[in-house]
Image (spheres, rainbow, N blue to C red):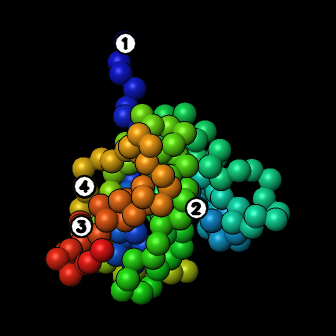
Amino acid sequence: MTKPPDRRITQPARRCLKSISTTFETQPAAADYWLTSKLKTFIGRTVFNAVLIDRNRETRVLDPIEQMLEALDEGSSLIIFPEGQRNTTDQMLPFKPGIFHLAEKRPDVELVPVWIENLNRVLPKGEVIPIPFACSVTFGAPIHLQDGEDKQTFLKRAEKCVLNLSPNADNHHD
C-alpha cells in the first residue's frame, strides 16, 4: 500500500507572491471573479483547480473554511494567499485568520511559507493568463500551530516566516 501524498498549505503573500504554499493542486479563489465568464470559469475550475469561495458574507451559502477543509480531506494541497486580496503595495498586508482556522482544525497539515518574487508582473491584477516573465519562488520550513498559541500570535509568526524569505528580509522589522 502506498502512502498518500503529504498535504500542505502554502501561504504566498500577494505583492511578490509572498506565500505559504506547496504543490499546485488546488487553491481558494474568489468566485465573484472566476465565475464572470466562460473562459475565467474554465481556467479557475479546470486549469487552477480552484476552490471557489464566495467573498460576500451575506449571500454565501458555503463556509469557506469548510470548503478548504474538504479539499484537504480529499488529499489536495492548498495554495493560500493569506493577505486575502491582491496586494499592489510594497508592504505585506496583515494576514487574514483563515490559515489560523485551518491550522487549528487540521494540525497535521504542514503550513509552508513561500515568497514569490515578481508575481504582479507574471499575473497582473485582472488578468487570467500568466505573462511569460521570470519569477522566483522561495520556500521556508513548514510551520504548525503551537500548543496554546492564540490567533494573533500565530498570524504574526506566519507573517514573519514569509517576510524572512523576502530578498529584502534584512529591511523588515517587527
Residue carrying label 3: 164
In the rendered image, residue 147, in percent from the top left (x then y), is placed at 41, 40
Which residue was labeled with disc 4? Answer: 140
Give yes or no for contact between labels 2 and 1 (Cβ–Cβ under 8 Å).
Answer: no
Find the distance from the CA under tag 3 to the CA under tag 2: 25 Å
- Which residue matches tag 1? 1
Which residue is rendered at x = 82% and y = 63% of the image?
A: 59
Instruction: Name the secondary structure under disc 1.
Output: loop
Q: Residue furthest top?
A: 1
Q: Amino acid at mark 1?
A: Met
Q: How far apart are the alpha carbons under marks 4 and 3? A: 9 Å
Question: Cα distance, mark 3 to mark 1?
Answer: 39 Å
Question: Disc 3 or disc 1, which is closer to the eye?
Answer: 3
Q: Does residue 50 appear in this view? A: no
User: Residue 143 at what x, y percent from top left?
Assistant: 33, 47
Categorize mark 4 by other alpha carbons within 10 Å: few (<14), some (14-19), many (20+): some
**Helix, strand or loop for disc 2:** strand
Type of amino acid under label 2 = Ala
